[in-house]
Amino acid sequence: MAAVFLVTLYEYSPLFYIAVVFTCFIVTTGLVLGWFGWDVPVILRNSEETQFNSRVFKKQMRQVKNPFGLEITNPSSASIATGITLTTDCLEDSLLTCYWGCSVQKLYEALQKPFHCFRISTPRALEDALYSEYLYQEQYFIKKESKEEIYCQLPRDIKTEDFGTVPRSRYPLVVLLTLADEDDREIYDIISMVSVIHIPDKTYKLSCRILYQYLLLAQGQFHDLKLFMSANNNSTPSSTSCAEEKSTDQSLLEKAGLSEGEVEPPEENSKDCVVCQNGTVNWVLLPCRHTCLCDGCIKYFQQCPMCRQFVQESFALCSQKEQDKDKLKTH
């Protein structure tokens, strides 16, 4: 019966042709746009559109409190000969231990040792892991929230003027911050912080700076502290000599293999989303580490709007509850 109806429709009505063409058009459109969930040949899509369909994973972040703070006072005046001044800002009583001429290999072996061997919660634990592969060690007691300045210097009887050419086997200075009270180590997730500091000498005149910082957890893991860049950081050199110094430092960093990871701290940061210019910046994009999108715009981007690099992962700086609390405080 159905066959007779189709034959009759084919012979006496142009609607049959219209229906066939319309059906073919719908099926073809569905295949091209992926309505049926089937794979479409790559020739039908450009490479950029294919990349956009990849899923961006959102990291689940857990907020922890870092009890340690360390910065270099007057880095331009620091050198192997004259020493270095450090400023601490710790939430609890702490111990600051300086290791001059620390072995690079032994330091990273110590950081990567498994938890069942030991935890670097005390200076003694790090010294045992380094097997005394350093030139000189000095220690200071830091009172909580004191923000005191500590002057450190390599003794002259060591007779070390430089640490050789790059790549070096020893870091000029490694600073360890640990909690002085054993009870405090049970309160905080972060029990110590290791800072690798470069100090200029006769051979390598790169300006003084913190190269790396590592946070060591009570569970035995360690994490590398990274600087996440805000989108708008407008910095203007104060003079030609300042610009020349920066270019010199950059060339030295490239020789040392640190040019990609070393980022100058921004002088002026914007809190507005670079897309809508209205929402508060809250999302960090990885691997480029740009912080430039708000909660409303993050879902529309698979590429960083600043550098156009594809986003592999992202995470929020603070939750929606924390943002609401901040808004209540401001009002």
Image: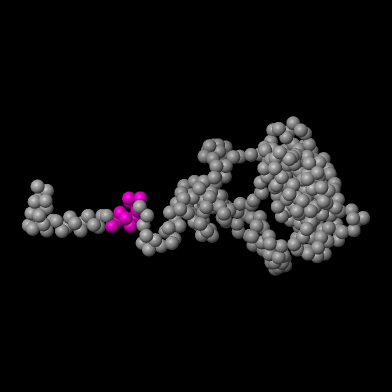
**What secondary structure is the magenta-colored segment mainly?**
helix
Colouring: one colour
Residue at 73% across, 40% down: 117
Please name the residue shown 53% across and 37% down the image: 321
Residue 145, how many percent across, how many down? 75, 39
Where is residue 220? Give x, y as percent: 69, 40
Relative side of 37 to 214, left or right: left
Residue 182 falls within the magenta-colored stretch? no
Instruction: Please give left or right for residue 205 compared with residue 224 in the image.
Output: right
Q: Residue at x 83, y 48 (%)?
A: 132
- In this view of the protein, can residue 76 be seen by the observer? no
Which span is picked out in magenta? 28-37
Residue 270 on image: x %, y %: 57, 52
Judge left or right: residue 157 versus residue 89.
Answer: right
Vertical comparison of 224 with 238: above or below: above
Residue located at (64% from left, 55% from top)? 266
Q: Could you tell me if residue 12 is visible in this image?
A: yes
